[in-house]
Amino acid sequence: MAFFIVIGLVFARNIPRTQFDADIKSQLPDDMPSRLRLDRIEEIFGGTEIIMIGLETDNILNGDTLKRVKDLSKELGKIHGVDRIMSLSETNDIRSVKGALLISPFLKRIPRKKSDFEELKKHIVENDMVYGSLVSKNFDAASIVVFVEKNINDEYIVGEIKKTIEKYPGKEKVEIAGLPYIRSLVSQYMRKDIKTFMPVGILIMLIFLYVCFRELKGVLLPFVVVILSISIAMGSIRLFGWKIQFITIILPVILIAIANDYGIHLIAEYQFELRENPDMDKEKLIKKILKSLGGPVIAAGLTTIAGLLCLATHIIVPAKQLGILASIGIAFALFSSLVFIPAFLAILPKSKPKSKKTGRGSPLEKILKILADTVAEKPKKVIFASTVFVVLASLGIFKIVVDTNPVNYFPKHSPIVRADNFINEKFGGSTTISVLASGDLKDPKIMKDLDTLGKKMESREIVGSVSSISDVMRKMNKVLNNDDPEFDRVPENTRTISEYYLLYSMSGDPEDLEKLIDFNYENALITERVASKSVKAIQDELRVIKNDIEFENSPFKLIGGFGDILAELVTAVVRGQLLSLALSMTVVAVIVGFLFRSMWAGLFSTIPICSAILVLFGLMGYFGIELNIVTVMLTSIMIGVGVDYTIHFLWRYRVYKRMGETSGEAAKKTLTTVGRGIVFNALSVIVGFLALLLSNFLPVQFFGFLVVVSITTCLIAAIVTLPAMCIVFDPKFLR
Amino acid sequence: MKKLLFLFFLIFNMSFGQNYTADEIVDTYKEKLKLDGSEAVMRLVIYDNRGNMRVRKIAAVTKLYDKGETNKILMRFLEPREIKGTSFLTYNYDSSKDNDQWLYLPSLRKIRRIVSSEKGNSFMGSEFTYADIGGIKITDFNFKLSGEKMVNREACWEIEQVPINEEKEEEYDFLKKIIYISKKDFIIRRALYYNFDGEPRKEFSVLSIKEVDLEKKRYRLTHMVMKNLENERVSEMITDQIVLNRDVKDEYFSFRYLKRE
């Protein structure tokens, strides 16, 4: 016992030192194609991530608001980790003044007179690079775009930005958006979730265990196992050099819900045997329990571990980690349950048995008896009804949507979603898709290709804004030809383009062009901002762009950006789902096959699981719950956990069959004996995962809800449909 | 007449061995860089912080006007090939009047006036600014002698150069500048530019100096380096050849000549 406690304490000491990590990129394998594409872009152009700050008021063309934009822009530019700033005061306008070319910030001076404001408004409207992007079309909002350098900590940079905003207060309403901001919130909420889940989950577990067993022994022994399992699993994070990820926050809940399963079965059996044989010696009693439950408990543990380990097939790094950590926790729980709980039952005084004569049986026992009678009498009808239900429920599968955008992790009313909607509506979005072009960027043909692609992008509804060097070229060309609309096109010879680069470098700040073209004029980046949270819409957009950039002598080399990453995550989620389904199903079937020495047993046991899976996906479709990086893990857990009920039922059923009972009679006796433990187990998982409903994240809440649904389905399949199948088909491996 | 009085004042001070004021030192330094006329071939080398390099080769002609108050400079690009023939003309004024600048674009056969309203703007995409290239507008700053220091084994005065108001700070884009001027020849050797947080942002170094006008003891900084301490970019202005020519033709600074390729 001391041994277990010491191990638990050693691992627990690691937990506070573990770091949090909300970075989407670090969730991706280093060799993921979209990540490699983004790395290549950032190598040439520096950090491409943006945080957008929106200032909203009646009309931004007033001295106070413009001064605030200018002050904020200047101050934000000084923050370490800020690569550059785009705003009215930091972005140059290109225009002609009395025949002279002027490249100057829009807000070089804050206007004072009404005519000055009118002039400024006119300049803004005439500049596509600003109008609708840095200033909303109806002038009720202005934005400041902060480019973040590579590898800057999200919470640090967001914290600095917030401090700067507080330093320059004003009457404008301020909204912040962008992936770094979302990720910093994810980090904060993670900590809140963990602080909530642990105590609530444990409290729920304690109450539940007491309600089930009505004695402290039944509460404390599983409780200790669970706590130690959590300590070891969470403490292992640091040992592996990992960090707590977004989905790692459900690890304690998984262990609270599942790690006590083995203890529950043992104690349920202990109470049952005690009631049947009140005078039996403690030693014999415990040996009998281990003999009858040892096999199925181990098999149940192995299937759970196998299901969790199948998470390793996911491309998402955190899912792999979660699978391994949970497996460690469950393995420890299994081991300590079979060693620790029996040892303590042997040491502690025997519980007082409830008198057989006085009790009419608990409500649960009554329900189980009714179920048993029903199944035994009408097994075929039960099978038919089950089949109909599964078919109807599974039709929802066709409505399933896959989504990986972290902004959809939050409820619609939350500040982050509101801010994201605001940025999307006013400034054309904060998610970026970039296209890299390579070649001689002084070549007019290439410049023309850039211009064509940029215009195509701008014409699509989903695209909020486009930035490209070709826009600068067009603007300069027009201005240098007396604002003649005829010259609103890119120059047609190499020399002119070269001269415009030189001219810009002599009149403006060369850093202006840093995000558009590289130092040697060999690489250019066209970046569009996407005003949609739907990853499907982003995927469609990527497909269109891909089609647009494939032609003979195309200068375009690759499409990248965070939109690209989100899109690839969708594919990865689907692939991971299918793979983990196939793998976990196979492994579970093999384990069950070994347990019963029959391959048919393995196949037979997957039928309830398959039904539950179909129902699960169907309900996801019906309720509009997306498949994302949290809910994608559900099936592996469900398969590993849900098959336990099947294993326990079949094992006990076979015992009674081999004692000479009829199929119907064996089913009845199984349900009224081990059925209690099965139900307790399922209910413990259900109530354990209820804690997830308290999460700050929608996917985690949905996850909790779906666990309840799927485990309930597995339970019903195991105690209703499965007995009926055993009676009707009477398989050999159960004789 | 003004120069004569200045000269007497200088001699008077030297005779009595008194220390110079900051203003006197800076005035002298400024005069030391004025050439009646010159012809030169220069290279502007720009390095970014990723190991890339860009070289522009320039032929330059200069001449003083208005009794030394105006410096007219014509620069013609020799390399790289795609901008060969492009020309830049600038009239730099000692007074607070903004400089006049024009660029000739051969492919368009047009002369375009450039309004470089910010003296802190980059010169041709380099780490030098127009103010660095054009010479000090003394009326824009307050100078204060803040000590003495050895720079490259040269005894120098340390002078603090501060824009006269916030508007000038914005225009030049620095809070203050510390310059080191040699006691021997009154030529700058080094400078540090401080950003608005009071931290050094750029470092200017002079690697070589050439006395071009032996008669009047006038010099040219023939190798200058500007290092951006924030983003690690470096630019160098190297004068490969330079000769004094008091008889530079006025024609060089006309629009007609600007157009000649």
Image (spheres, rainbow, N blue to C red):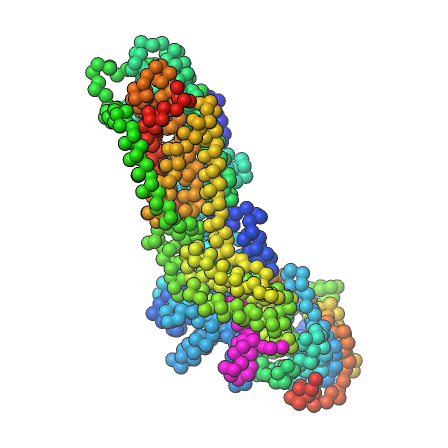
Decide whether residue A485 is among the magenta residues: yes
The x, y position of residue B211, in whole percent, is 77, 76
Quadrant (top left, top right, bottom left, bottom right) of the C terminus of chain A: top left
* Residue at the image position 41 percent from the left and 59 percent from the top: A532
Q: Is residue B65 visible?
A: no
**Quadrant location of residue B149?**
bottom right
Q: Is residue A388 visible?
A: yes
Left or right: A585 in relation to A218 = right
Decide whether residue A34 is among the magenta residues: no
**Quadrant location of residue B97?**
bottom right
Q: How many marks?
A: 0
The x, y position of residue A12, in whole percent, is 47, 32
**Quadrant location of residue A67?**
bottom left
Nearer to us in this view, A183 or B216: A183
* Residue at the image position 43 percent from the left and 78 percent from the top: A122
Nearer to us in this view, A251 or B255: A251
Q: Which residues are magenta?
A: A466-493
Left or right: B223 in relation to A333 = right
Nearer to us in this view, A182 or A485: A485
The x, y position of residue A13, in whole percent, is 48, 33
The x, y position of residue B173, in whole percent, is 56, 70
Residue A439, above or below A363: below
Left or right: A426 in relation to B140 = left
Residue A162, above or below A451: above
* Residue at the image position 54 percent from the left and 37 percent from the top: A240
Residue A630, above or below A82: above
* Residue at the image position 48 percent from the left and 32 percent from the top: A587
Quadrant (top left, top right, bottom left, bottom right) of the N terminus of chain A: top left
